Image (cartoon, rainbow, N blue to C red):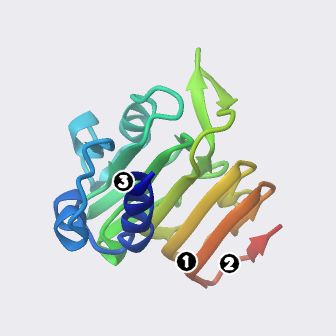
């Protein structure tokens, strides 16, 4: 129980710190229980030209249900034209304004929290730890869908700058925390 409490405290205070190595150093907590994945290790390029949707999904779909994982998008300009599904228990984070998500070609939500791909079809993740997304900059998105959408029971959305999206954040879930979100030039900033 003590280690779990320390880990939860470290994770909640470390969201905007930076890389997994910096998180460990800043919090003096062993995060071995968390698998860390860099989206570039799954084929993301971050050059602003290559569509990185599939690479992001390979990274987020690589864990079993409820497995704690840190999904890291280092500095770069990631073009996402489809939907990235972030599983329960996962934390997708970047380096703030340096981790730029360009969704200007998106036809639906760019990030869907609390789901995974099963047999090519999105499926809900039942139970598990909250799903988190933080420290990213987003541009564009579908007119009628949230740049970030969730119906998950338990989520955290923080440290985002979203510009020119149709809907910035679309929430149908419960038990969530949202903080430090800047929304600029959206049709609807947040929809609950």
Occupied quadrant, residue 145: bottom right
Few, some or many C-alpha atoms within 10 Å of disc 2 (few <14, some 14-19, many ≥20)? some
Q: Earlier in the sequence, mark 1 or mark 3?
A: 3
In the figure, 188 relative to 83: above or below?
A: below
* Picture quarter with the C terminus: bottom right
Q: Is residue 129 left or right of residue 109?
A: left
Residue placed at 32% from the left, 41% from the top?
33
Towards the viewer: 82 or 11 = 11
In the figure, 33 relative to 180: above or below?
A: above
Indicate the secondary structure of the residue bearing disc 1: strand
Report, in whole angstroms, how far the alpha carbon at label 3 lies from the one at label 2: 42 Å
Tell me whether circle 3 and circle 2 mark residues in contact (CB < 8 Å): no
Q: Earlier in the sequence, mark 1 or mark 2?
A: 1
Mark 3 or 2: in front is 3
Q: Which mark is residue 186?
A: 2
Tell me whether circle 1 and circle 2 mark residues in contact (CB < 8 Å): yes
Q: Which residue is mark 1?
A: 163
In the current view of this chain or complex, which residue is farthest to the front?
2
Indicate the secondary structure of the residue bearing disc 2: loop
Few, some or many C-alpha atoms within 10 Å of disc 3 (few <14, some 14-19, many ≥20)? few
Report, in whole angstroms, how far the alpha carbon at label 1 lies from the one at label 2: 7 Å
Q: Is residue 178 left or right of residue 190?
A: left
Q: Which residue is mark 3?
A: 3
The location of residue 95, given as percent across then percent down, is 30, 69
The location of residue 72, given as percent across then percent down, is 31, 53
Q: Earlier in the sequence, mark 3 or mark 2?
A: 3
The location of residue 90, given as percent across then percent down, is 47, 46
Q: Is residue 21 left or right of residue 120?
A: left
Occupied quadrant, residue 39: top left
Towards the viewer: 76 or 11 = 11
């Amino acid at each position: 129980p003590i280690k779990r409490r320390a880990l939860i405290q470290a994770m909640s205070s470390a969201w905007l710190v930076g890389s997994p190595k910096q998180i460990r150093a800043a919090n003096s907590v062993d995060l071995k229980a968390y698998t860390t994945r860099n989206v570039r290790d799954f084929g993301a390029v971050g050059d602003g030209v290559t569509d990185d949707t599939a690479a992001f999904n390979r990274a987020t779909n690589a864990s079993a249900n409820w497995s704690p994982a840190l999904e890291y998008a280092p500095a770069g300009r990631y073009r996402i034209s489809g939907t990235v599904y972030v599983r329960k228990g996962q934390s997708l984070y970047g380096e703030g304004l340096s981790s730029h998500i360009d969704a200007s070609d998106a036809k639906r939500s760019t990030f869907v929290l609390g789901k995974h791909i099963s047999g090519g079809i999105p499926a809900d993740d039942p139970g598990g730890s909250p799903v988190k997304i933080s420290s990213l900059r987003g541009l564009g998105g579908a007119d009628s869908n949230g740049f970030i959408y969730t119906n998950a029971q338990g989520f955290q959305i923080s440290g985002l700058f979203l510009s020119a999206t149709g809907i910035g954040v679309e929430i149908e879930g419960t038990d969530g925390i949202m903080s430090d979100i800047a929304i600029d030039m959206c049709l609807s900033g947040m929809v609950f």
